[in-house]
Image (tube, rainbow, N blue to C red):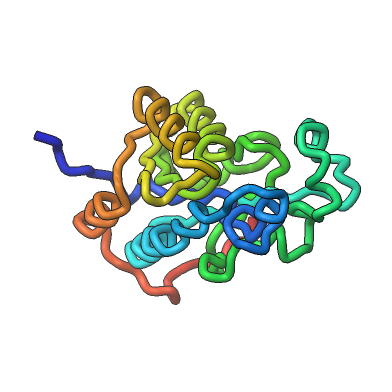
Amino acid sequence: MTQPLTLDPARTAVLVIDMQNAFVMPGGSMARLGLSTARGHDIIEPVHRLIEACRKSGLPVIHTLTTFRTDYADAGLVAERFPALQPLGHIMSGTWDAQIVERLLPRAGEYVITKSRFNAFYGTNLELVLRSLGVDTLIVAGVATNICVDSTIREAFIRDVKVILPRDATASYTKEMEEASLATLGFMFATVTSVDAVVQAIDHSPRAAVSEHDLELVGV
């Protein structure tokens, strides 16, 4: 019999990866490139539910977004691999394409990690934020399962950070890509579960709920 998911809310945060217009909206640059963003769009509400459960119980909420300079000098091999993205203005800093979707916009007191590579630890202060919060467990959500989510979870494992991954709060461009990554991540790098199970674990945790007024504004 499968044991219910448990977590220590005092040592847990949610990490929402790259829920940006470019990757999940019909008018985003990935859709205009010819890829389907439907699966990413479908997880907006499950991710919102997850974030709201964390907010209600006072768990830290961390968002990441990937952005590039307008000259793509920081895009590296992404620009070489997909040269058609630059004319589309793909996740250029300051554009609608690069913004987090309106439904999931960060609130005051939440953390925003800006990155230019798939792995959210690379070249960022994410690990310092986790250390300052006393966090050793991440609930990870977002896109794409087989790219930024996968890269970040593997790096978290290397840094001895435990990961909980709700399968209905992550997506890729095809079901096959998504399922392949979930199988590998679940085998070694993360506890693959559901949004329902995570919300239930949060709701049954001993930490008391807090109001928005109790959140301390911290800029990162």
Residue at the far bottom: name it: 213
- In the image, residue 95 sits, relative to residue 5, either above or below, namely below
Residue at (71%, 60%) from the top-left corner? 97
Image mark count? 0
- In the image, residue 59 sits, relative to residue 126, either above or below, namely below
In this rendering, would 170 be left or right of 101? left
In this rendering, would 107 be left or right of 200? right
Give the x, y percent position of residue 202.
27, 55
| Residue closer to the observer: 58 or 168 | 168
**Residue 131 visible to an observer of this rendering:** no
| Residue closer to the observer: 83 or 155 | 83
Residue at (61%, 35%) from the top-left corner? 119
Give the x, y percent position of residue 117.
69, 38
Task: Determine which quarter of the picture holds residue 3.
Answer: top left
Residue at (22%, 55%) from the top-left corner? 200
Give the x, y percent position of residue 149.
52, 39
| Residue closer to the observer: 204 or 177 | 177
Residue at the far front: name it: 34
Residue at (52%, 65%) from the top-left corner? 104
**Residue 215 visible to an observer of this rendering:** yes
Quarter in which the C terminus is drawn: bottom right
Give the x, y percent position of residue 75.
80, 39
Residue at the far right: name it: 71
Quarter in which the N terminus is drawn: top left
In this rendering, would 187 be left or right of 204? right
